Image (cartoon, rainbow, N blue to C red):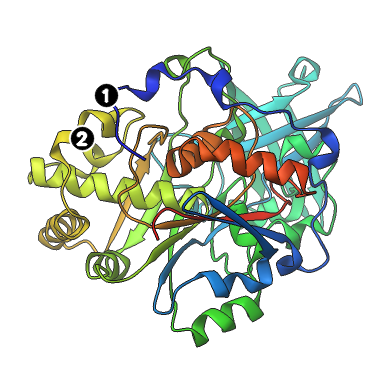
């Protein structure tokens, strides 16, 4: 797709919509993860297959990058003195704190939360008790869009992660329009998830099984991992007429030096991002390297990618190797073996993807930032792909089917 002079802030969100019938939304996963359908897009053509056969479309010696962040049991249900159920959805820790580290913390903890039936919260504290553990919650402050809640528990030697595992539920997406069930604990989690911090699953990875992974390894496909702790903002549709009025959510990313070295030296390889969260992380890392090249004395906090920042940096773009080499040199001088930083990058047309030649993803909601990212990868052909999927019984959204987008031949 050719770069144009237009800025994505001026895009009309009405141009990124389609009719999604309720019956096309997959409310539950298939019994076998890799039995989902796979739509393969390459050079304007579409081909249908099953996900278990994805290895056929990944060239030998390719590089796949996965997001191995783990979904936490972020949804709590309290009961008020008036016998009203109050749902508390933990979004992220208060302050500039990585969710993975906060979850290791002990009492007390302050988190930004969404609260359902907030008007029924009359008393100062709500509490839950189970198996000798008691959890208490009290409101610190109400803000537009979230409530700041302090959690305390006893015995106090438990971590917040352990507390959530006792009292919480997996926060399946609201568009599934059902309550969490016991099976979601396993199915709404990738098999390789290993670092807690997300409140939504990186759903493209849900299709991968041990069999698929084994087949990829036999084809000498390298698999590397990073973390983007997915926030609830991933479900937030764009409500404004243009993107200018949309506030993109920020999320914590984490990538180690080994991954950066591998990417910097992968010029001859085909690189694929597994999921939009992996792609957003990889593109963020590229632009962080660009920022370091522009200002070698930049501080870690200044590396955070703001919503529109990449579009102001376009004239500073360089090769992937140059960018990541600069970032690694910067890390070396600071004795850092990993990057831990926030990103609020918004990828939308006419953005040109820098790091990968392919994307594995699901089918996303109309008027969502995820669909905008897909449009950046496919151009106007996203409409052709989605029309095909709707007409050929593909299942949509988190528990739905997959698409492999090849951006180059």
Residue 156 visible in the snapshot: yes
Viewer-proximal residue, 334 or 130?
334
Q: Position of residue 217 (x, y in %)?
A: 50, 83
Reading the image, the residue beneath label 2 is 314
Q: Which quadrant: the N terminus?
A: top left
**Apparent side of residue 204 relative to residue 116 in the rendered image (left or right):** left
Secondary structure state at the residue bearing disc 2 = helix
Q: Are marks 1 and 2 in contact (CB under 8 Å)?
A: no
The label shown at residue 5 is: 1
- Give the total of numbered labels: 2
Viewer-proximal residue, 114 or 173?
173
| Badge 1 or badge 2: first in the primary sequence | 1
Q: Is residue 138 above or below residue 220?
A: above
Secondary structure state at the residue bearing disc 1 = loop
| Quarter residue 209 falls in | bottom right
**Quick one: label 1, few (<14), some, or many (20+) residues within 10 Å?**
few
**Quick one: label 2, few (<14), some, or many (20+) residues within 10 Å?**
few
At 83% from the left and 66% from the top, the residue drawn is 31
């Amino acid at each position: 797709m050719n770069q144009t002079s237009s800025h994505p802030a001026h895009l009309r969100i009405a141009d990124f919509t389609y009719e999604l019938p309720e019956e096309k939304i997959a409310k539950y996963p298939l019994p076998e993860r890799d039995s989902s359908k796979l739509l393969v897009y390459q050079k304007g053509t579409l081909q249908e297959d099953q996900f278990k056969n994805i290895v056929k479309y990944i060239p030998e010696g390719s590089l796949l990058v996965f997001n191995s962040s783990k979904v936490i049991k972020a949804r709590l249900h309290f009961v008020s003195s008036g016998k009203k159920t109050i749902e508390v959805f933990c979004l992220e820790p208060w302050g500039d704190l990585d969710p993975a580290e906060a979850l290791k913390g002990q009492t007390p903890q302050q988190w930004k939360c969404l609260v359902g039936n907030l008007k029924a919260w009359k008393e100062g504290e709500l509490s839950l008790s189970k198996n000798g553990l008691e959890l208490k919650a009290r409101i610190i402050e109400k803000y537009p869009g979230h409530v700041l809640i302090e959690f305390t528990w006893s015995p106090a030697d438990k971590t917040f992660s352990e507390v959530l595992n006792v009292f919480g539920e997996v926060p399946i997406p609201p568009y599934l329009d059902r309550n969490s069930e016991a099976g979601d604990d396993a199915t709404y989690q990738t098999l390789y998830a290993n670092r807690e911090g997300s409140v939504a699953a990186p759903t493209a990875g849900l299709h991968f099984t041990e069999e698929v992974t084994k087949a990829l390894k036999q084809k000498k496909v390298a698999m590397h991992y990073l973390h983007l702790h997915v926030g609830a903002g991933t479900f937030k549709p764009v409500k404004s007429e243009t993107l200018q009025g949309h506030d993109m959510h920020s999320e914590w990313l984490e990538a180690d030096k080994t991954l950066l070295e591998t990417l910097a030296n992968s010029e001859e390889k085909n690189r694929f991002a597994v999921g939009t969260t992996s792609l957003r992380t990889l593109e963020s890392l590229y632009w962080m390297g660009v920022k370091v090249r522009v200002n070698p004395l930049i501080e870690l906090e200044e590396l955070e990618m703001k919503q529109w920042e990449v579009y102001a940096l376009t004239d500073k773009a360089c090769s992937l190797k140059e960018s990541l080499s600069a970032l690694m040199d910067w890390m070396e001088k600071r004795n850092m073996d990993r990057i831990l930083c926030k990103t609020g990058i918004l990828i939308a047309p006419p953005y040109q993807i820098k790091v990968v030649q392919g994307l594995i993803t699901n089918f996303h909601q109309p008027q969502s930032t995820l669909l905008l990212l897909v449009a950046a990868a496919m151009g106007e052909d996203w409409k052709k792909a989605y029309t095909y999927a709707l007409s050929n019984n593909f299942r949509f959204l988190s528990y739905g089917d997959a698409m492999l987008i090849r951006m180059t031949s």
